Amino acid sequence: MMLLDTGMVILYLAVLIGIGLKGRVKDVSGFTASDCGYGTFTIFASLSASYIGGGYSSGNAAEAYSGGIGMTVALFGFSISTILIGRFLVPGVKQFAGVTTVGGIIGKAYGRTARVLTGIFSFSCCAGMVGAQMGAIGLVFNVLLGIPPKLGIIIGCGIVMLYSTSGGLKSVIMADMIQFVMLAIGMPLLLVMALSRLGGVGALLETLPREYSNPFNGTTIAGFISLFITMMFGEALAPPYTQRLLIGKNPSGTARATILSGMFSIPFFMITGMIGMTAYSLNITGEASAAMPALVKSILPMGIRGVVMVSMVSIILSAADGFLNGASVGLVCDTVKVLYPDMSEKAELWWLRAVNLATGLAAIAVAFILPNIFNILIFAYSFWSPLILVPLAAAMLGIKSNGRAFRRALVAGMASSTVWNYVFLKPWNIDGGGVGMVFNLIVFALSTREFHKYQSQKIITLKCR
């Protein structure tokens, strides 16, 4: 009975490989998609497919299975953030015409050193995110297809590495279009059929423990607020998302796409959370992390099960490929190329492909060592929101500052988040990412004020002369 469903998954994976091989790029502009102007729907679909990964789907279902609505509500922070970015920040990309990376924006605003540092931390954040997705794909392949988790990680990452290394961001975006359609169909279909098996939403509410409707279940109010803030800012303007904001045809269309993507995430998070709680009510499995794939395998008929299996695989691979490309582009274009400006285009493309492959192999190692998807995600966030997010948002808003402000803020964010997490051990269950971002903001604001004061004094002095 599983042969048809397994065949559908294999066919889908073969299509992804074909996309990469057929779309093999021959230059750097092809690998970074800098020569393309994508329309509103393409940006919307690719952006949505990129952020909806294992953590926001099967990870959210697992959290809902074990504790109720808390994580789902916290994920709305990401939705709000994305909508606000589309409304207030995306119009600012017109200042950076021709730029295709986060480091490119940072370099133009704060100088060469800032760009080099951004490339390093972009790589670190993206590599961790790929590791989280690979942990999820190993679990999905294990529960759905009976493949050992570590072998599933190797297979999943190998396929992503193949088409993203060959076709670069162009192939990734083409794959994202297919993956978006599959996840938009598969998850609602799974929830509808699961609720039908249970007896409807009313039956779900009756069978769930009362505390599952409390978002503070299992944590404190401060801990929940910390989680909400982490979800709101942890991935905001992360490299693969910002890349997509920079390759749109025009800022207004890209802004609409970003707002639509944020709005799309709200019902999607509700659907995946309800899937986890439905799996709990149906007593599908005793393991929270397997809630979604176990539900797929247990209740869906042949054929439909194959469609939803493809949807689950799509969700994870669509996030992994974007972050894998973001890691290689960030490190090579914003760090290596800047340090070695005389590098030929052929050598740069070789570096991009080599780093893409090396990052994939490192992600496999991370997934082997750290099994918890959300723990990997939050660790990856520590290389982003406490360090880069505030100066990046300021640059997109057109706020003028300098490299000194950037470096001071980066050190403040890194030091404060590290001390909070590993010396104070997260007091009140508050993660250091939010703490680091606050210190980053304060130091950046003070240093920027100092910069403007110095500029004003300089202008006055010149006039007096």
Image (cartoon, rainbow, N blue to C red):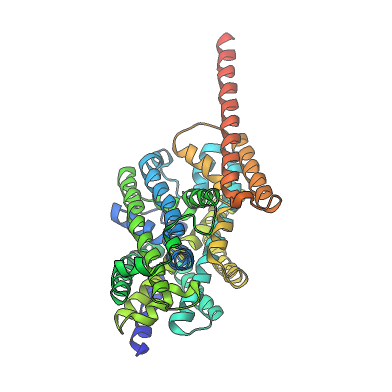
Residue 144 spot, x, y in % from top left: 43, 81
Q: Residue furthest top?
A: 464
Is residue 21 visible in the rendered image? The answer is no
Residue 325 spot, x, y in % from top left: 48, 61
- Which quadrant of the view contains residue 445? top right
Which quadrant does the C terminus fall into? Answer: top right
Residue 104 vs 12, above or below: the answer is above
Is residue 102 visible in the rendered image? The answer is yes
- Which quadrant of the view contains residue 439? top right
Q: Nearer the viewer, residue 386 or 188?
A: 188
Q: Nearer the viewer, residue 156 or 31?
A: 156
What is the tally of numbered marks visible in this picture?
0
Q: Nearer the viewer, residue 439 or 254?
A: 439
Residue ID at (61%, 47%): 117
Residue 463 vs 431, above or below: the answer is above
Residue 390 vs 152, above or below: the answer is above
Q: Residue furthest right?
A: 423
Residue ID at (45%, 54%): 74
Which quadrant does the N terminus fall into? Answer: bottom left
Residue ID at (43%, 60%): 69
Residue 421 spot, x, y in % from top left: 65, 52
Residue 339 spot, x, y in % from top left: 62, 49
